[in-house]
Amino acid sequence: MSIELMTTVQADFDHGELYFVGNATTVIRYAGFSILTDPAFLHAGEHVHLGHGMYARREVEPACQISELPPVDLIVLSHHHGDHFDDVAARELDKNLPIVTNEHAVGRLREQGFSHGYALDTWESQDVVKGDARLRITSMPGKHAPDQIAGMLPPVMGSMLDFSLGEERKFRLYISGDTLLHERLYDIPRWYPGIDLALVHAGGTTLMGIVVTMTGEDAVRVVEIVEPKTAIPIHYNDFSVFLSGLKDFQRAAEQTRATTEFHYVSHGDTYRFRPAQ
């Protein structure tokens, strides 16, 4: 069943923008939709609990707070973890916002009072309709940690966002989520080619001496695998557990043979895009 959103304006398919709040938190505005990803708004110096006695300190102030966001239609959440859906988000976000995520996160969100969670398994989709515009969100494969500690971290998903006017797809956006390199990523370009923009999580999150998210070099390798027209690294410097910064990504990007165009955003930057004609 589709999520039906109210609209009073005609969708603009010619221009879109991405506002970078910090970490994996972005606001994507395109085709009349306003989408918030992985909301985390704790201030620099504050700590998040990552479970099993593990904590991370926020190192960089988010570019804005929830009260300063534009109106949001829905949230796309890669997983329910303290650095992706924090106490500020749980306290201040509208409890009636639709949140598209995985089953584990829907259960946690329900405990926090969020009543409109939509759970997806890998390759499952959820349609969202707003006037003439249609957004299809499909869960992409993700692997949050090596097998030896996989049970200590919540399951994660990537997301494919397909924006369409009727049956005509206008723009395809991939968000990697907190994943490591793994074999199932090679299925993505087989089933979802022609990615216009990719947001790739880097940072090399390290817990108990074990890397549980892609390093900068790994994130560039994912770009080589899924072959987007444009790629933007996010999730690279906000928390104390990140051991692979933006410079690692940039060095790898300079050496890749991928034809992808790379763009870089700092906290508070807006990246504007137009679909290929």
Image (spheres, helix red, strand yellow):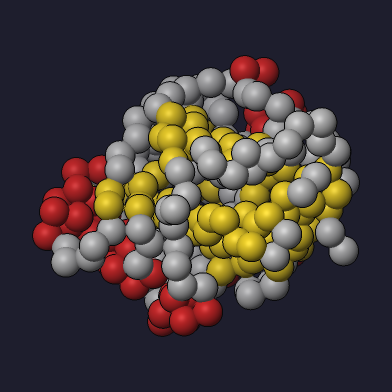
Q: Nearer the viewer, residue 209 or 9?
A: 9
Image quadrant in which you'd find residue 241:
top left
Determine whether, in the image, residue 139 is placed left or right of residue 192: right
Residue 74 appears in the figure: yes
Residue at the far front: name it.
277
User: Which quarter of the picture shows residue 164?
Assistant: bottom right
Front residue (pair 88, 65): 65
Asked if residue 158 is positioned above or below residue 13 in the image, the reply reads below
| Quadrant the N terminus occupies | bottom right
Image x and y of residue 251, in percent? 14, 51
The spot of residue 32 in percent (x, y) is 68, 38
Identify the residue at horizontal 65%, vertical 49% (top origin).
76
Work out which residue is located at the far top of the displayed protein and give it.
68
Q: Is residue 154 left or right of residue 98?
A: left
Instruction: Pick whichever, 175 or 259, lies toward us.
Output: 259
Q: Residue at left 53%, top 59%?
A: 172
131 to the left or right of 233: right
Q: Residue furthest left?
A: 255
Image-based side of 133 in relation to 141, left or right: right
Q: How many marks?
A: 0
Q: Residue at position x 62%, y 67% from top?
A: 139
Q: Residue at x 69, y 72 (%)?
A: 124
In this picture, is 78 found above or below 188? Answer: above
Q: Nearer the viewer, residue 82 or 178?
A: 178
Relative to 92, does residue 115 appear above or below in the rendering? below
* Residue 137 can be seen, yes or no: no
Q: Position of residue 272 (x, y in %)?
A: 43, 35
Image location of residue 200, percent across then percent down: 40, 54
